[in-house]
Amino acid sequence: MKKFIILLFLSFSTIQVYAFENLVYTLRGFPGDLTQGTIAIQDLKKHASQINILSSQAYSIDDKGIVVGTLNTQMVQIAKNAHIKQMPLVANTQFDPEIVHTFLHDKAAQDRAIKSLLMLCKQNQFEGIQIDFEGMSFLDKDDFTQFYQNISNQFHTNGFKIAIAIVPVLTDSPPETAYLRGRYEKWTGVYDYKKLGESSDFVTLMAYDHHGGITPPGPMAGITWDKAIIEYALKFIPPEKISLGTPWRVGYWYTGRNTESSAHSLGSIEVDLSYEDAMRLLNDNHITTQWNDEDKVHFAIYRNHFLYEYMYLEDVDSFRAKVDLVTKYKLRGVSNWCLGGEDPRIWDLLAKLSNN
């Protein structure tokens, strides 16, 4: 079976060739959900020929530059046997803004972390790593960019690849609304798309969580939102370096008690479900989904004991719409969060794409 989809297009008199790259993420230890971990391992075995890069949620860096974490040894061996490239995720500890701020202002800590990560790559024969630093203040933008350029130079000098996962942004300056402005200042405004793109082998746009635990119910990654994210990124990063992040999970909102409130008031609570668990819940309640053609997503809104519940499914149909965007904009491929939570029909779609 072919592992790549070759997309040809003309650019004036030059023919360029792009490969559709399929990257999958795996969770660290599958906390609270051993079933998904088992499914992820089974999926990796069964569909290894359709996976180009395995990026496991493995390591984190603290304020002193100490790298901690482990990999699932079973997954590592499966990937090696199948010749799947491995680029583990490297995150800042707990996405804590103070910890990462301290790290970004300590050159010795940065050098310590880079040395450790290079050693891990050499010892485990990794293709490289993917940096996933989140929860940073927009005031640390220059310091983070400088750190990333430094680690990129050292990785490339040593023959390893480096990529970065970016929380998407749609504007060059802080938005007007309080929520979006706060998100920009505390989460999304730190990323210098142009400079990070120049230093990266590829960039994953984490185009999910459009709606989540602190928003009203809605699609995790509606196609209109995805399109806007891609078009903004293309102003700074060439398409062959962009991998579109796609959610392999289901957003589920239900009404429950808000324990953070002194009055313990009822409120909307969001949790992520695997596709399998979501379908079981819908079937048990005899619920039929509807199709939102604008966002290209199936959804269900229903009452459960006088309380409303909402579900937005990322399934094979929504995934197909995202693949169409990748093709339209001639992007590198997709980065899927995460293995074990997907609609199994997605693999049939990927198989058809691989055989084209």
Image (cartoon, rainbow, N blue to C red):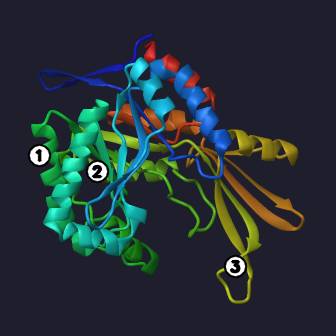
Locate residue 74 relative to residue 185 in the image: left or right: right
Which disc is residue 259 wearing? 3
Q: Position of residue 26 (x, y in %)?
A: 49, 41
The mark nearer the N terminus, 1 or 2, is 1
Q: Image quarter for residue 104? A: bottom left
Assess disc 2: are there few (<14), some (14-19) or many (≥20) residues with their C-alpha within 10 Å of its C-alpha: many
Amino acid carrying label 1: it is Asn
Image position of 312 (left or right of 333): right
Disc assigned to residue 233: 2
Residue type (three-letter) at the residue carrying disc 2: Ala
Find numbered disc 1 in the image and state the secondary structure of the residue it sits on: helix
Numbered mark located on residue 244 in the image? none
Disc 3 to disc 1: CB gap under 8 Å: no
Depth check, mark 1 against mark 2: the one in front is: 1
Q: Name the residue nearer the viewer: 47 or 64.
A: 64
Task: Name the mark on residue 153.
Answer: 1
Q: Answer with the quarter of the image where residue 211 lies.
A: bottom right
Q: Pick out the residue farthest to the right.
A: 305
SS at mark 2? Answer: helix
The tally of labels here is: 3
Residue 327 visible in the displayed image: yes
Res. 316 visible in picture? no
For marks 1 and 2, give the CA distance: 22 Å
Q: Is residue 100 above or below residue 75?
A: below
Left or right? Give the position of 34 relative to 141.
right
Real-space Cα separation, disc 3 to disc 1, in angstroms: 47 Å
Q: Position of residue 306 (x, y in %)?
A: 88, 68
Q: Quadrant of the N terminus?
A: top left
